[in-house]
Image (spheres, rainbow, N blue to C red):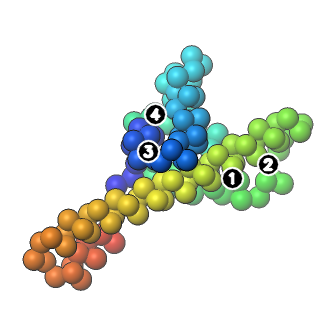
Amino acid sequence: MNPSLIDLVNFTSTDEQRVIQEYMETTKSCWSGGNYWLGGQIKLSPHEKITDEMLTKVAKIYENPSSLDCANSWEYASVMTASRRFFEFDAIVKRYVEVQKRRIMAELNKTPLNTDVNELIVSML
């Protein structure tokens, strides 16, 4: 159920493409080795699934920006840009998961199963 960066490229609307494309551009840089850094913190392959644990770990880092140790205003600006990009990315991932759950629920509702069972199945995803 968790998406990869590649999954999100195919999922996002035109308005959301900017954030996803910024991460994809990183994977094309010669210094990145084909990887990107989720929120500037966790190194991932574009095909690697993005878990809730990863998102939570990065979100905790950015919850208190005053605790970040930045050497100068340029570094602070870079950190704030990464933070903004991460929270936009996080919202896209959450929407992806919800859409996938709705798709699965729609498929389950086509079967003669009890709807309570369908909701239980989807809640386990």
Residue 8's disc is: 3
From the top left corner, tell me how far across and down residue 60 is, in percent. Answer: 66, 57
Badge 1: residue crowd in 10 Å (few <14, some 14–19, many ≥20)? some
Q: Give the mark nearer the N terminus: 3 vs 1.
A: 3
Could you tell me which residue is drawn at 79 percent across and 54 percent down?
Answer: 65
Q: Give the mark nearer the N terminus: 3 vs 2.
A: 3
Of the residues shown, which amino acid type is indicated by label 3? Leu
Q: Measure how far apart labels 1 and 4 are at the Cα level.
A: 21 Å
Q: Nearer the viewer, mark 4 or mark 3?
A: 3
Q: Is residue 95 above or below residue 58?
A: below
Q: Give the mark nearer the N terminus: 1 vs 2.
A: 1
Q: Give the mark nearer the N terminus: 4 vs 2.
A: 4
Of the residues shown, which amino acid type is indicated by label 2? Leu
Q: Measure how far apart labels 4 and 3 are at the Cα level.
A: 13 Å
Residue annotated with mark 1 = 61
From the top left corner, tell me how far across and down residue 72 is, in percent. Answer: 89, 37
Q: Would you say 14 lies left or right of 61 here?
A: left
Residue annotated with mark 2 = 68
Q: Nearer the viewer, mark 3 or mark 2?
A: 3
Of the residues shown, which amino acid type is indicated by label 4? Ser
Badges 1 and 2: C-beta atoms under 8 Å apart?
Answer: yes
Residue 48 in sight from this viewpoint: no
Badges 1 and 4: C-beta atoms under 8 Å apart?
Answer: no
Q: Give the mark nearer the N terminus: 1 vs 4.
A: 4
From the top left corner, tell me how far across and down residue 27 is, in percent. Answer: 52, 27
Of the residues shown, which amino acid type is indicated by label 1? Ile
Could you tell me which residue is drawn at 76 percent across and 46 percent down?
Answer: 80
Residue annotated with mark 4 = 45
Could you tell me which residue is drawn at 48 percent across and 53 percent down?
Answer: 93
Q: Measure how far apart labels 4 and 2 are at the Cα level.
A: 26 Å
